């Protein structure tokens, strides 16, 4: 029995989908390729966004694939680190949005709020990624999380940063593809376990 489901060797099991569900696999692969093809956003930008989203859904296979792809497209480790921190900040902020209604205000909460605010703002500070790119990533993560507050905020910020409607749409499609891909990649584990039983 295998003790680590997240082994890259398990990815070989995905080859069996060619005979199990060929039409659906082809449709998925075509969709994924179309989403990640250069458009208003170039391949490096798309793979950087994909990695931040993969980190947000915590899919080890997706993180592996999109780290390698982003690196191949010329992304630096600093850029990728910043992208993942954007995902962490947006995901953390989205989680806290309803806290005032639930907990009210307290001194302890205010201290926590200050440290959270510092982290969230720090993630968006100028760095290797442009403010525009950081807002594109934030918008994609907001859609991935389905957080209406974050979607509204980062759509407004993206527009203010000069993000075109096409760039916004492409980022949202990447979020959709990563949502699907994160589930798709788990079939490698399912097939591995199925074959062992």
Image (cartoon, helix red, strand yellow):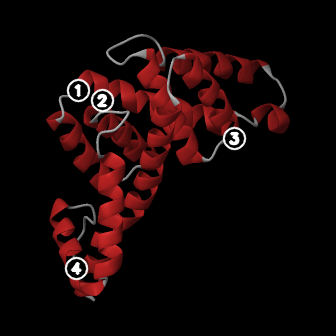
**Mark 2 = which residue?**
80
Assign a secondary structure to mark 2: helix
Q: Is residue 88 visible?
A: no
Helix, strand or loop status at disc 4? helix
Q: x, y (%) of residue 56?
A: 45, 43
Are the residues at dot 1 and dot 2 in contact (C-beta closer than 8 Å)?
Answer: yes
Mark 4 highlights which residue? 18
Quarter where residue 85 is shown: top left
Circle 2/circle 4 CB separation < 8 Å = no
Rendered-image quadrant of the C terminus = bottom left
* Distance from Cα at disc 1 to Cα at disc 2: 5 Å
Whether tag 1 and tag 3 are in contact, CB under 8 A, the answer is no
Mark nearest the camera among 2 and 4 is 4
Q: Pinpoint residue 176: horizontal percent, then vertical percent.
A: 47, 53
Query: Marks 2/3: CA distance?
Result: 26 Å
Q: Quadrant of residue 152?
A: top right
Residue 131 vertical placement versus 156 (above, below): above
Q: Nearer the viewer, mark 1 or mark 4?
A: 4
- C-alpha span from label 1 to label 3: 31 Å
Q: Where residue 130 sits in the image (x, y, percent)?
A: 39, 16
Q: Residue furthest top?
A: 126
Residue 8: tell me if it is visible: yes
Mark 2 or mark 4, earlier in chain: 4
Label at residue 148: 3
* Contact, mark 2 vs mark 3 (Cβ under 8 Å): no
Q: Nearer the viewer, mark 2 or mark 3?
A: 3
Name the residue: 52% across, 19% down: 119
The one of 195 and 163 positioned closer to us in this rendering: 163
Tag nearer the camera, 1 or 3:
3
User: Label 3 crowding class (10 Å Cα cut-off): few <14, some 14-19, many 20+?
Assistant: few
**Looking at the image, is mark 2 or mark 3 earlier in the sequence?**
2
Residue placed under numbered mark 1 in the picture: 77
């Amino acid at each position: 029995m295998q003790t680590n489901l997240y082994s890259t060797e398990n990815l070989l099991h995905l080859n069996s989908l060619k005979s199990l569900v060929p039409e659906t696999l082809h449709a998925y692969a075509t969709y994924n390729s179309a989403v990640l093809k250069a458009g208003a956003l170039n391949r490096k930008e798309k793979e950087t966004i994909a990695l931040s989203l993969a980190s947000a859904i915590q899919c080890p296979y997706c993180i592996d694939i999109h780290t390698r792809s982003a690196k191949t497209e010329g992304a630096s480790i600093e850029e990728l680190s910043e992208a993942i921190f954007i995902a962490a900040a947006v995901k953390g902020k989205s989680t806290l949005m309803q806290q005032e209604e639930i907990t009210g205000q307290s001194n302890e909460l205010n201290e926590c709020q200050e440290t959270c605010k510092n982290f969230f703002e720090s993630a968006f500070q100028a760095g290797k990624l442009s403010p525009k790119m950081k807002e594109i990533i934030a918008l994609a993560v907001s859609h991935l999380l389905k957080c209406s507050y974050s979607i509204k905020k980062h759509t407004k910020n993206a527009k203010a940063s000069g993000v075109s409607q096409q760039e916004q749409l492409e980022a949202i499609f990447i979020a959709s593809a990563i949502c699907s891909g994160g589930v798709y990649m788990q079939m490698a584990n399912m097939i591995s376990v199925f074959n062992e039983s």
